[in-house]
Image (cartoon, rainbow, N blue to C red):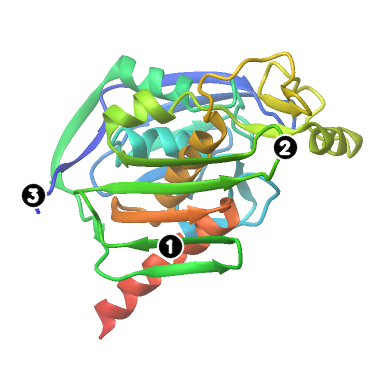
Amino acid sequence: MRLRSQHTIRRPVSVSGVGYWSGRDNRVDLLPAPAGVGVVFLRGPGRMPSPVAAAVGNRIDATQRTTLAVGSSRVEMVEHVLSALSGLGVDCCLVRVTNEELPGLDGSAAAFVDAIDAVGLEDLIVPTDPLVLDTTVRVGDGDSWIEAGPPRHPGLSVSYELDYGHGPIGRQSLDIDVTPETYRDELAAARTFIMLEEADRLRAAGLARTCGTRDLLVFGPDGPIDNALRWPDECVRHKVLDLVGDLALVGRPVHAHVRARRSGHRLNAALAASLLAVVGRRASA
């Protein structure tokens, strides 16, 4: 298998917006980084911000989002920017943020993709070290599970089954080879979705009060409220977008075919940890 080089972005670029959960403004500066650095979030003011590496070992449990923490430094809802970076093949990047929660934007990764495309990528000449799976690894049970097996192409591919029963979302499936081209065209603009009852519960708990039906897909009995779908199967596309971002916590490109049914952030991260454990056991054998 021919290995591609590591890439970073050519020059700094920024994306700004409001966090869904906190309602706080956040400016996200994407900065070039040297080979081997990976993706590192820089949290805090001044010349010496606290680094939080995008690594599954830094993940902490959080409701409906991926959150990372190192000591007192914490960054929330990182899955969309990680998905954009991974989907476009950006291996090394510093992500400087002014607040804990990354902006929700329109609920997708499209703004991050547009920012990265605006500045382009730089070849760092150093080859990547992909995690190439030659066995099957599975986590979860019953109807909610995710597994990874040997790749069907030189990279990541995903087959995802979404099942919301007989409601407005229903059952959806997507099978895709994730490349920069397919990521841009088929995944990047797919938005976060939530059922109306769940949105009401969050607002009653004092969360997501600044987030409305035009900021993401809120499903009522008859479909999205005050919004229109970008694809008939936009919900499953967003699940795959999230999965790409969560698997970026492996810290290296993943060459595997991933199958998932009703998997979310917790199971995605459990798979990432299991993949690293498999590689670690082989390295020590």
Q: Position of residue 31 (x, y in %)?
A: 37, 29
Foreground of the two, 44 or 65? 65
Foreground of the two, 18 or 176? 176
Foreground of the two, 273 or 91? 273
Q: Position of residue 168 (x, y in %)?
A: 70, 32
In the figure, 282 relative to 167: above or below? below
- Residue drawn at 64 percent across, 35 percent down: 101
Residue 37 makes an appearance in the image? no
In the figure, 206 relative to 52: above or below? above
| Residue furthest to the front | 166
Disc 3: which residue = 2
Local secondary structure at mark 3: loop
Marked residue nearer the N-terminal end (2 or 1): 1
Q: Position of residue 66 (x, y in %)?
A: 58, 47
Q: Which mark is residue 71?
A: none
Q: Amino acid at mark 1?
A: Glu
Circle 3 packing at 10 Å, graded few (<14), some (14-19), many (20+), is: few
Circle 1 packing at 10 Å, graded few (<14), some (14-19), many (20+), is: many
Quadrant where the image shows the C terminus:
bottom left
Disc 1: which residue = 147
* Image depth: mark 2 or mark 1 in front: 2
* Image depth: mark 3 or mark 2 in front: 2
How far apart in space, not on screen, are marks 3 and 1 (Cα)?
25 Å
Q: Amino acid at mark 2?
A: Gly
Q: Amino acid at mark 3?
A: Arg
Q: Would you say 71 lies left or right of 79 here?
A: right
Marked residue nearer the N-terminal end (3 or 2): 3
Local secondary structure at mark 1: strand
- Residue drawn at 70 percent across, 29 percent down: 20
Q: Which mark is residue 167?
A: 2
